[in-house]
Image (cartoon, grey):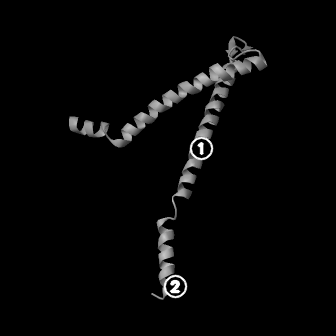
Amino acid sequence: MLKEFKAFALKGNLIEIAVGLILALAFAAVVMSFTEDIIAPIIAAIVGQPDFSELTIQLGDAEIRYGSFITVLVNFLIVAFVLFLIVKGANTMISKKAEDAGPTEVELLTEIRDALRSRGV
């Protein structure tokens, strides 16, 4: 059983997932700091308060805190936009790398076939 656990724990996929999770947590801290330390003061300068958490509506005995929802929604949009930029940049780099890689194996084989045909082989 210990041998099976060791094989499971040291699988490449599990280690990659763990690294990805740690990076995601670090990324979340960066985005949270960006939101709280940069975006919130800009919002405060424009609107007059750094977040909308204090915005509420009293409905009988209930308090609807729609401001907290707006704050979380703004944070989500910031994270989504940053991830969009990262994925877009990565896709651009990957496509440039593919362009620089030269012809594919199929293209090379097609060229060889065409060259052999032109010789009459």
Looking at the image, residue 78 lies above or below residue 86 = above
Residue 62 lies, in percent from the top left, at 68, 13
Q: Secondary structure at mark 1?
A: helix
Q: Residues within 10 Å of mark 1 (few under 14, many from 20)?
A: few
Q: Is residue 50 above or below residue 3?
A: above
User: Which quadrant is home to the C terminus?
Assistant: bottom left
The outermost residue toward the top is 61
- Marks 2 and 1, the one that precedes in the sequence: 1
Residue 70, placed above or below residue 18: above
SS label for mark 2 = helix
Write down the residue under mark 1.
89
Q: Nearer the viewer, residue 72 or 23?
A: 23
* Residue at image point 59% right, 43% down: 89
Q: Is residue 12 left or right of residue 54?
A: left
Q: Is 3 left or right of 14, judged from the image as shown? A: left
**Residue displayed at 77% across by 15% down:** 48
Q: Is residue 109 above or below residue 66?
A: below
Residue 11 percent coordinates (x, y): 32, 41
**Residue 41, x across and y down, in percent:** 70, 18
Residue 3: quarter of image: top left
Q: Tell whether label 1 touches label 2 (CB within 8 Å).
A: no
How many neighbours does mark 2 have within 10 angstroms: few (below 14), some (14-19), or many (20 or more)? few
Q: Amino acid at mark 1?
A: Gly
- Tell me what residue is drawn at x 49 percent, y 28 percent: 25
Horizontal side, residue 11 vs residue 52: left or right: left
Which residue matches tag 2? 118
